[in-house]
Image: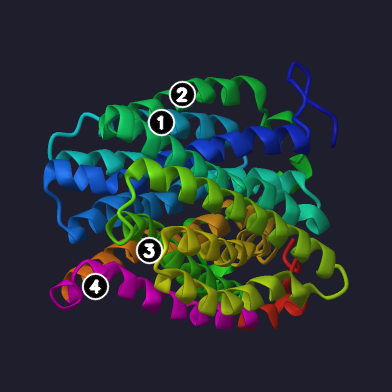
Amino acid sequence: MNQVAAGQKPANSLRVTLWILLIVYIFNFLDRQIVNILAEPISRDLGLSDTQIGLMTGIAFAAFYTFLGIPIARYADRPSTNRVSLISISLVIWSGMTAVSGMAQNFVQLLLARIGVGVGEAGCTPAAHSLIADLAPPEKRASAISFYSLGIPIGGLLGMVMGGLIADAYGWRIAFFVAGLPGILMALVVWWVLRDPRMSTVLETRQAAPTLSTKEAIREVLSSRAFVYLMIAGSAAAFLGYGKATWTTIFFQRTHDLSPGDVGLWFGIGGGIAGVLGTWAGGWFADHYGKTNRRHVLTAPAIGMTVAIPIAIAAYWAQQWWVALILIMLPTVLNGLYLGPTYSCAQGLVPLRARAMAAAVLLFAQNLIGLGLGPLFFGILSDFIKPMAGPDSVRYVLYGAAVMGLIPSFFFWRASLRLNEELDKKG
């Protein structure tokens, strides 16, 4: 039955849904990443160590984001769940807690506020990916999820530029207020404009199948060897991406003596544009070359992360900040190629009833290992070598992070070898 139930509004088109969800994801990453550009002034104001910066920017958010993501995804996969309402409520929570971060008077209070942001954001992406996968045909899924994923570089760009400039002019506390409060208004737009197709019975025939238990859903997700390789690759990419994002902003401030506003403006705009190009190109390559051979959905991420290594090393070695900034843009493009292909493959490797769970499991691994441990690991390493390296400790840490790009490259290649056999066989 494909007719809209009486008294209900029709579901939105894919185009409308993608644009609204893109704006939501921009708020998501703006609120998540603004703390990176504010880390140095917060550290000076509250007297934090590099390890505490790593905790604040990483594990405080990631632990709750990842562990709550599984039960929330289980809820999102239920046929009776309105995924639009779930996204709206989540947006209110994380936006409010971002604003509350500006009132923190010590490390513990700031840590608790960042935990609150993680709690709210746990309800967004699994539900959004499930919604997009229901609306987009398989041959356009990578491009659709890549479009949604543009929220990552755009949100990061806005967070860096806006956060840095406001911090320079008015202080880091005001930057949190400005970042958080508009999201509450956006939640009303989401609730008012979007419709979950489930609620219009568009997908009624798909809902006829019995709901999987949490254990069954996780078993279905992990039964795909391609998904497991993809999860390892995505986790390693996130570990390096989040770690480098945090410490590259601090690198420009410590090594090249730039202010938060300068870093936010130049690195934020340059990195944001490069990230947008990489994310868009990743989806285009996946859909274009994957038509003839599905393994090529992941070819661009595997090659791109390898090519990025020597360019990134040259960027961190450069003695002029503007040279370093220009050089770092190309690795940013190349490292962004994996987002759309990774998440679209995850949706195609599992049954329909486990799509939100697939996104949640992938996000669990990526954010616990990536966001949770990446900034923290590099912060601990920086503290460890600081007695020997001095202010250049961050530079040497970033050298190592660049070389580690071989790890996700290898596992993207391994996952690609199984895509022809496994992709969309469980739909």
Under circle 4, the secondary element is helix
Magenta: predominant secondary structure element? helix
Q: Which mark is residue 179?
A: 1
Spot occupied by residue 124 in the image (x, y as percentages of width and height): 51, 42
Q: Amino acid at mark 1?
A: Ala
Q: Amino acid at mark 3?
A: Gly
Query: Is residue 251 a member of the stretch shown in magenta?
Result: no
Q: Which mark is residue 243?
A: 3
Check disc 2: other Cα within 10 Å, few if <14, some if 14-19, many if 20+.
some
Q: Which mark is residue 212?
A: none
- Residue on which the image places disc 2: 182
Spot occupied by residue 200 in the image (x, y as percentages of width and height): 73, 29
* Left or right: 38 in relation to 30: left
* Left or right: 312 in relation to 397: right
Spot occupied by residue 338 in the image (x, y as percentages of width and height): 61, 65
Query: Of label 1 and label 4, which has the lower sequence position?
Result: 1
Check disc 4: other Cα within 10 Å, few if <14, some if 14-19, many if 20+.
some
Query: Of label 3 and label 4, which has the lower sequence position?
Result: 3
Q: State how the image is colored.
A: rainbow
How much space separates mark 2 and mark 1, taking CA atoms?
A: 7 Å
Query: Of label 3 and label 2, which has the lower sequence position?
Result: 2
Residue at the image point whose x is 45% and y is 39% from the top: 161
Query: Is residue 410 a member of the stretch shown in magenta?
Result: yes
Of 68 and 383, nearer the camera is 383
The image shows residue 328, relative to residue 165, as above or below, that is below
- Pointer 2 and pointer 1: residues touching (CB < 8 Å)? yes
Quadrant of the rendered image containing residue 54: bottom left
